[in-house]
Image (tube, rainbow, N blue to C red):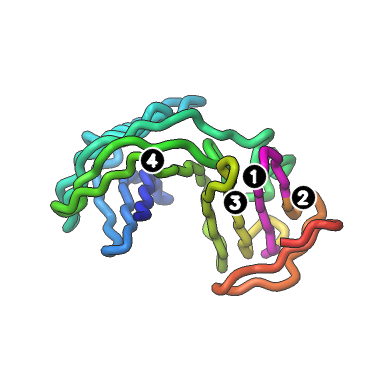
Amino acid sequence: ETLSLFPLLRIDKAGNTEAVIRVESREGAWSVSCPGESFQASEGLFQIWVQGSLFNRKGLWLDLRSGGITLCGELRYGPFTPLKYDLMGPLGALPVFPMRRGVISMGHRLEGVLLLNGRRIDFTGGAGFIETFRGTGRPSASLWSQSIWREERSNSILVSVERMPTLTGPRINCLCVVLYGGREYRLASYRGASVERWSTEGAVIRQGALRL
């Protein structure tokens, strides 16, 4: 079972705000709209409160009953798996990029039960992933994939390829991380990685002797 949750705060050019919790599952996708003032986030601390639902480092507590969806319950998290350094590397400090991506955890244990439109989903023993996205623009095209699997230990992969608008014009940017066998491998445009080809079906990325 896979469930994706996106607590969002949207701000238009006039300064009007709207809080949204986006939910995606095998059953469908829903967007629950809330007043902008109901969105509260702690600076420098992963904690987001949106009108009765809470997301933080310990877990999440959901109480959604509008927008065509009922989603309630709580999940507890195990220890997070952070990256060794910022996902965007030196690019994160450059104003030329209107969008910023980050990773809070490449993988952590889950424990708890959620009720989605009356269906009970037990996530105990499963794994979670948390990333962040903020900015004033959107990619004109993108590919995103993430997975967690277990062999002798837990492994995970994140692949992001985007055609991004920048102050100097559009460019293809890739950000890829593989945690395998206790090691972190980073393939990224700022480390010399090149995207040999990509589409909705996948991507081929090369960085020196590494090929993904």
- What amino acid type should be assigned to the residue bearing mark 4? Gly
| Front-lying residue, 124 or 98 | 124
**Residue labelled with disc 1:** 179
- What amino acid type should be assigned to the residue bearing mark 3? Ile
SS category of the residue bearing label 4:
loop
- What amino acid type should be assigned to the residue bearing mark 2? Tyr
User: Distance from label 4 to label 1 (Cα)?
Assistant: 20 Å
SS category of the residue bearing label 2:
helix
Earlier residue among tags 4 and 1: 4
Earlier residue among tags 1 and 2: 1
User: Distance from label 3 to label 4 (Cα)?
Assistant: 19 Å
Q: Is 105 drawn above or below residue 12 in the view shown?
A: above
Give the residues in magenta: 170-186
> Residue 155: which quarter of the image?
top right
The image position of residue 88, as x and y in percent, is 67, 44
Label 3 near label 1: C-beta < 8 Å? yes
- Pick the quarter of the image with the N terminus: bottom left
SS category of the residue bearing label 3:
strand
> Residue 154: which quarter of the image?
top right
Q: Residue at x 58, y 40 (%)?
A: 153
Q: Residue at x 39, y 27 (%)?
A: 58
Q: Residue at x 25, y 48 (%)?
A: 121
**Residue labelled with disc 4:** 125
Q: Is residue 86 magenta?
A: no
Earlier residue among tags 3 and 2: 3
